[in-house]
Amino acid sequence: MIVRRVGVASVAKIYGAISGAFGLVAGLFLALASVVGAGLADSSDVSFLGPLLGVGAVIALPVFYGVMGFVAGAIGAALYNVFAGMVGGVEIDVEQR
């Protein structure tokens, strides 16, 4: 079996979802680091910024990663279609049970 073309929109959606999930994990780690850093800060003047930026990261990073993953997936799928037309597709061996 040879994959000659892939759906650009379907690949972009999947890649965007996967990237968004990675962004959520990164945002959670950044939020945790921000809360810990705010707890260790000496100055009480800006101690509210750490948790605020951490919670913002949980919202902003998945959106940013998701959008960038969607764009990268669309570009990658389109390039695959172009090059698969020139040199052939990816060959996949499958087995039926």
Image (cartoon, rainbow, N blue to C red):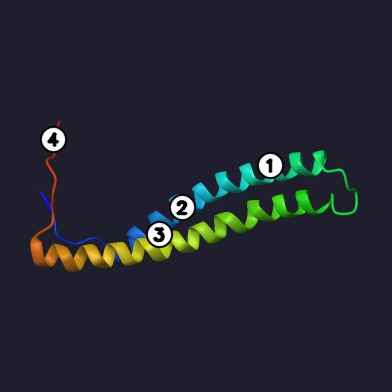
Earlier-in-chain disc, 3 versus 2: 3
State the residue in front, 94 or 70.
70
Kind of residue indicated by mark 1: Ala
Q: How many marks?
A: 4
Kind of residue sitting beneath label 2:
Ser
Comparing labels 3 and 1, the label whose residue is closer to the camera: 1
**Separation (CA) of disc 3 from disc 4:** 28 Å
Q: CA distance from mark 2 to mark 4?
A: 32 Å
Closest to the camera, between mark 3 and mark 4, is 3
* Mark 2, other Cα within 10 Å: few <14 / some 14–19 / many ≥20: many
- Do the residues under discs 4 and 1 have CB atoms within 8 angstroms? no
Within 10 Å of disc 4 (Cα), the crowding (few <14, some 14-19, many 20+) is few
Residue bearing mark 1 = 33
- Per the image, the residue denoted by label 2 is 19
Query: Does residue 17 appear left or right of residue 96 in this picture?
Result: right
Tell me whether the residue at label 3 lies in contact with that at label 4, contact meaning CB atoms closer than 8 angstroms.
no
Judging by the rendered image, the residue that carries numbered circle 4 is 96
**In the picture, which quadrant includes the C terminus?**
top left
Q: Nearer the viewer, mark 3 or mark 2?
A: 2
Question: Which residue in the rendered view is the most extreme toward the top?
Answer: 97
Element marked by disc 4: loop
In this rendering, position of residue 3 left or right of residue 15: left
Look at discs 4 and 1 and give the one toward the viewer.
1
- Looking at the picture, which amino acid does disc 3 mark? Lys
Image location of residue 54, percent across then percent down:
70, 50
Structural distance between the alpha carbons of marks 3 and 1: 30 Å
* Comes first in the chain, label 3 or label 4: 3
Give the spatial CA distance, label 2 vs label 1.
21 Å
CB within 8 Å, label 2 to label 4: no
Q: Which residue is mark 3?
A: 13
Check disc 4 and give the amino acid type.
Gln
Residue at the location (61% across, 48% down)? 27
